[in-house]
Image (spheres, helix red, strand yellow):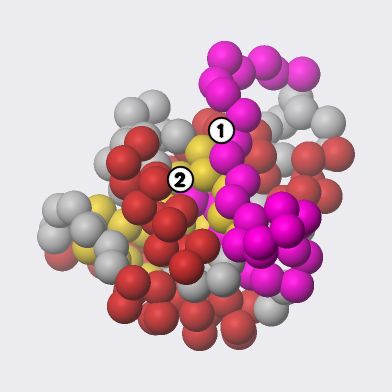
Amino acid sequence: MASFPYPSPTLSLPNQSGTECRDVPHVLAVDDNLIDRKIIQTLLTNSSCRVTTVENGMRALEYLGLIEDQPNSTATMASGVNLIITDYCMPGMTGYELLKKIKGSSLLKEVPVVVVSSENVPTRIHKCLEEGAQMFMLKPLKQSDMNKLRCHLMNHGS
């Protein structure tokens, strides 16, 4: 099993009791910037989503069970993810490369992926949408952006 020297993914639970909610959408947020991860986490939690955050594409693949030498037990966890939001510009693996790996997986290809970036580069946006991204959003994200995501969460189901 591959061992990654990264901290555990952060899971945000929107209910008051501190118990895990299974009936709310589960979003995996991938961003190398801690502040951007916290913003996404807060916005999604305010939209009644369960949020798991990871800091790079490799951690996302690990969480989703897409690492080749990893046992399939994590893939069970991945099936609970209803939406993936990933930053485009990250060291090691770009959001575009992560998108391609997710869309190439028989287990996860139907999960909507939203790519976000602070740079408005039309060729980048077009490339991500052609590869299967549900949406491309520009940073900084706002609460109104989360309303646009709700329809994708509702269409994909829990």
Q: Position of residue 138 (x, y in %)?
A: 22, 63
| Disc 2: CA contacts within 10 A as few (<14), some (14-19) or many (>=20) | many
Q: Is residue 68 visible?
A: yes
Question: Could you tell me how far apart the alpha carbons at marks 2 and 1 are, in whole angstroms?
Answer: 8 Å
Kindly state the secondary structure of the residue where label 1 is placed. Answer: helix
Image quarter for residue 148? bottom left
Q: Amino acid at mark 2?
A: Val
Residue 62 pos. (x, y %): 64, 34
Residue occupying image coordinates x 62% and y 29%? 8
Q: Residue at x 31, y 41 (%)?
A: 35
Is 9 colored magenta in this rendering? yes
Please identify the quadrant where the N terminus is shown: top right
Q: Is residue 102 left or right of residue 33?
A: right
Regarding residue 127, the answer to whether it shows in the image is no
Give amino acid for label 1.
Arg
* Viewer-side residue, 146 vs 88: 146
Q: Specify start and end residues of the magenta stretch as a single range.
A: 1-29
Q: Secondary structure at mark 2?
A: strand
- Residue 154 vertical placement versus 139 (above, below): below
Q: Is residue 95 left or right of residue 150?
A: left
Check if mark 2's residue and mark 1's residue have beta carbons within 8 Å: yes
Q: Is residue 103 magenta?
A: no
Crowding near pointer 1: few (<14 within 10 Å), some, many (20+)?
Answer: many
Main SS category, magenta section: loop
Q: Where, by quadrant of the figure, is residue 131 drawn?
A: bottom left
State the mark number for residue 30: 2
Position of residue 43 measured from the top left corner of the image (x, y, whole percent): 41, 63
Quarter residue 16 falls in? bottom right
Q: Which residue is mark 1?
A: 59
Question: Measured along the vertical axis of the image, is residue 78 above or below residue 24?
Answer: above
Per the rendering, the mark at residue 107 is none
In this view of the protein, which residue sits in the foreground, 133 or 77? 77
